[in-house]
Amino acid sequence: MRKIGFACLLTTFMLFFSGTCWAAPSTYTVKSGDCLWNISKNTGVSQDTIMQINNLKSIDLKIGQVLKLVDSAPAPVEKQAPAPIAESSSTYTVISGDTLYEIAQKFGTTDKNIREMNGLSGNIIHPGDVLKVPGSDYTPPVSRAGVTSMGLKLIESAAKHLGTPYQYGGTTPNGFDCSGFVKYVYSKYDINMPRTAAAQYGTGVKVSQSELVDGDLVFFACNGKGIDHVGIYCGNNRFIHSSSPRSGGVIYSALNSGYYASRYVGAKRIIR
């Protein structure tokens, strides 16, 4: 028997009966009497693994040679596919005061998801924007004072016509006057409103300005000769209406602005 072979067997025999537990290090330095077989047994790393991670072509070793026992190359990380966007979707029309985060909360999703669905590079949205949102069983929340979600649906429908030009006597999306706009929006929910602002003021239940909720109608006497203007309240002290050719047709206005505050007459609730 060759001397190195005897030394290898002797070292292995002594280690086997020593009862010592060895923790596998990351490297091993070859000593006199070592062979690949006993290094494998002592470290718990297979001979094939040692040969592979050290690029050994044979089992021949040199004293002082440092062998890697752990592959230092990081294991490839499998890229996690992004969460799929819901195939089914519906739409949501942005109203005044909305943020992308709040819309996402309503639909049980994330603002990132909505941005991806709509190709948005940021969080900036504008009243009247129609966004794709995940299909869901979402029901708009109940408004203040117990008014149902119909009010929110009304102002969402109204916002789709932002920028529609003012047209005297107009009742279609080609052009609206103030009462024609109200009549058109309400008709989408099978509510038949009178044609003029004054006649519309004769419907519904009177409510105070402090009790206004989404979908209520607000009325004004702009020319000082009785009620001649109407809009749809949409929260945050604002209303949407077909204003005038000079103002841009269908727009949002502040209820407490100097012009409308001084001409405000009252409000009526049509939906209960």
Image (cartoon, grey):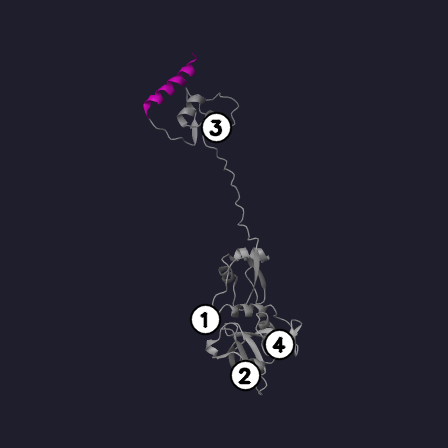
Amino acid marked by disc 4: Gly
Judging by the rendered image, the residue that carries numbered circle 1 is 146
Q: Which residue is mark 2?
A: 263
Query: What secondary structure characterizes most of the magenta part?
Result: helix
State the quadrant of the N terminus.
top left
* 76 or 3, nearer to the observer: 76
Identity, as a three-letter code, of the amino acid under mark 2: Arg
Q: Is residue 222 above or below residue 156?
A: below
What amino acid does circle 1 point to?
Gly
User: Does residue 229 appear to the left or right of 102 in the view shown?
Assistant: right
- Picture coordinates of residue 246, whole percent (x, y): 64, 77
Q: Position of residue 250 (x, y in %)?
A: 61, 73
Instruction: Kindly report the distance in space between the C-alpha atoms of the residues bearing marks 4 and 3.
Output: 82 Å
> Secondary structure beneath disc 3?
helix
15 left or right of 221? Answer: left
Numbered disc 4: secondary structure: helix
Q: Which of the labelled discs sits on residue 49, or is there none?
A: 3
Q: Position of residue 195 (x, y in %)?
A: 61, 79
Question: What is the quadrant of residue 131 in the picture?
Answer: bottom right
Specify start and end residues of the magenta stretch as a single range: 1-19
Contact between marks 2 and 4 (CB within 8 A): the answer is: no
Which is more toward the observer, 137 or 47? 137
Q: CA distance from mark 4 to mark 1?
A: 27 Å
Q: Disc 2 vs disc 3: Cβ atoms closer than 8 Å?
A: no
Residue type at the position of mark 3:
Thr
Single out the mark in the foreground, 2 or 4. Answer: 4
Q: Is residue 37 above or below residue 184?
A: above
Where, by quadrant of the figure, is residue 117 drawn? bottom right
Which residue is at a point 46% across and 28% down the rendered structure image?
A: 67
